[in-house]
Image (cartoon, grey):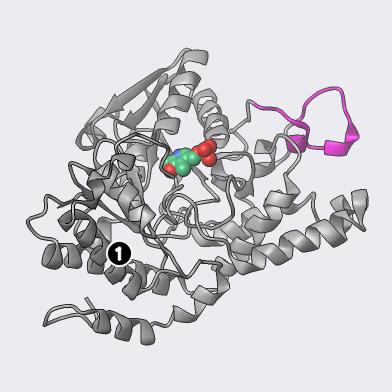
Amino acid sequence: MTGLAGGPLTRERCAALDATDPLASLRDRFQVPDDVVYLDGNSLGAPPRAAADTVRHLLDEEWGRGLIRSWNEAGWIDAPRRIGDKLGRLIGAAPGQVVVSDSTSVNLFKLLTAALRARPGRRVILSERDNFPTDLYVAEGVARGMDAVLRIVDRGELEGAIDESVAVLMLTHVDYRTGFMHDMGSLTEVAHAGGVVALWDLSHSVAAVPLAVDEWGVDLAVGCGYKHLCGGPGAPAHLYVASRLQEEMRSSIQGWMGHADTFGFEAEYRPAPGVLRHLCGTPPMLAMAALEAAVDLFGSIDTAEVRRKSVALGDLLIRLVDERLAGRGLVVASPRDGACRGSQVSLSHPQGYRVMRALIDRGVIGDFRPPDLMRFGLVPLYVRHVDIWDAVEVLREVIDGELWRDLAYAVRATVT
Ligand SMILES: *Cc1c(COP(=O)(O)O)cnc(C)c1O
C-alpha cells in the first residue's frame, strides 16, 4: 500500500497521507458534519454542496418564474436523457444508451420483462442466492407473471447453471453485504456463449468502481442514484440498454414519456426509438436537479484516482483491524484483495448489531446487515485516512470497554 509500507501505523502517518492526497480538496464540495465519521456512503451518499444550488435554482427560477414553460425552456423534458448520457460516461456507456428514471426496482422490472419477451424460447431468469433482496423479489414476481422461473444458485455454480433454458443472467456487480466484486466482463462473455442476456445491477458500483459496460459487452443494466453517486435520498435510478438490443427490447410499462410522440396524444402506444421507450411517467424534477449536481461533480474528477484511494482506504481499514483489533472476534468478511472488492469493508462480529449501534452513538456511522455484518462504506471524495484511523479506535473502545452491552442497544431498531 502506497506510503504505508514498514513500521506500525499511527494517526500521524494517516494524516500525512491525507496531506498529500490529490482528492483531499473534494471534501469541501460535500456537506459532511465535522462531528461524525461518515462511513455509510454505500447506503446514502453525503450531499454535494452544489445540489443545494441546483435545487434552489430549480425552485426559484425554473419553477417559480418559468412555471410550465420550463419543461422546454429549462430542459426539464430532456433531463432523463441528458443526465443519462452524462451518467453513461461514469459507467463506460456511449451516449444514447442510458436514461435516468424511476427506482432501481422498477427499472429491473422493466428490463427483466423486456429480456424475457425478447427470448421467447427460454423461460429461466438465473441469479445467485446472495443477490440483493429487491432484485430477487422483483425477479420472482416477473417470473410468476410471465410463466417463467427464477433459478437461484450459489455463486460458484453460476457458470454451470447456464443452459439453453436460461433467458437472462441477472447479477449485482458488487455484493451489498461483503463488497465482493464479480468479473463483469468474463461473466457476460459466459452468458453470451450460452445465448443468454446479461443484466447487471450497478447499484453498489456506479461512482465507486471503474465500469466499462460497452467494452465488456453488457446487454442491460440498472443502477441506483443515492448510494456512492450521492444523488440524494431516493434519487432517481438509471437503466442501460446496449444500442444493438434497443430495437428488440420493449418496455412493459408503456407510458407516455416512452411514446414515440409524447405530446401527440395518439390513441395507440408506439414505442419511442432507442432507450427512451423505457421511460414511463413524468420525471421528478426536484430530485433530478440534485442528482444532476452529483453526476456533474463525478463527471469532473479522475475516476482512476478515486479507485486508487478507495482501495487504499479499504486496505488501511483491514490492516488496522489486523494490527490493532486482533483477538477480539472480528472477522474481515470482505475480500482482502482490493482488486475484487468494491468500495466498502465489512466486518463480522457476534454482537455486530449492538456494536454498530454503539459506534453510531459515538459518531462513527456505518450500518449493519444480518446476521452479523458491520458495513463501512468508503467514499474517497470525502472520507480521509484519519477517519479510518478514528473509526477503528472507537471500535476498539466499544469492544474493549464492552460498551455495546448497554441495554439500549439490545432492542432491535432500524439502523440506517
Ligand atoms: C440499493 C439497491 C437497490 C435499491 O433499489 P430501490 O428500488 O432504489 O429501492 C436495488 N438493487 C441493489 C443491488 C441495491 O444495492
Image height of 24 relative to 201, above or below = below
Q: Position of residue 98 (x, y in %)?
A: 60, 49
Mark 1, Cα crowd under 10 Å, few <14 / some 14-19 / many 20+, is many
User: Residue, x 32% and y 55% (percent of image)?
Assistant: 359
- Residue highlighted by disc 1: 391
- Residue 227 vs residue 258: left or right? left
Front residue of 27 and 389: 389
- The amino acid sitting under disc 1 is Ala
Residue 266 counted in the magenta span: yes
- Residue 396 vs residue 183: left or right? left
What span is in magenta? 253-270
Which quadrant would the C terminus be assigned to in this image? top left
- Residue 395 vs residue 38: left or right? left
Which quadrant would the N terminus be assigned to in this image? bottom left
Asked which secondary structure carries label 1, the reply is: helix
Q: Main secondary structure of the magenta part?
A: loop
Residue 219 appearing in the image: no
Image height of 134 relative to 24, above or below = above
Residue 279 counted in the magenta span: no
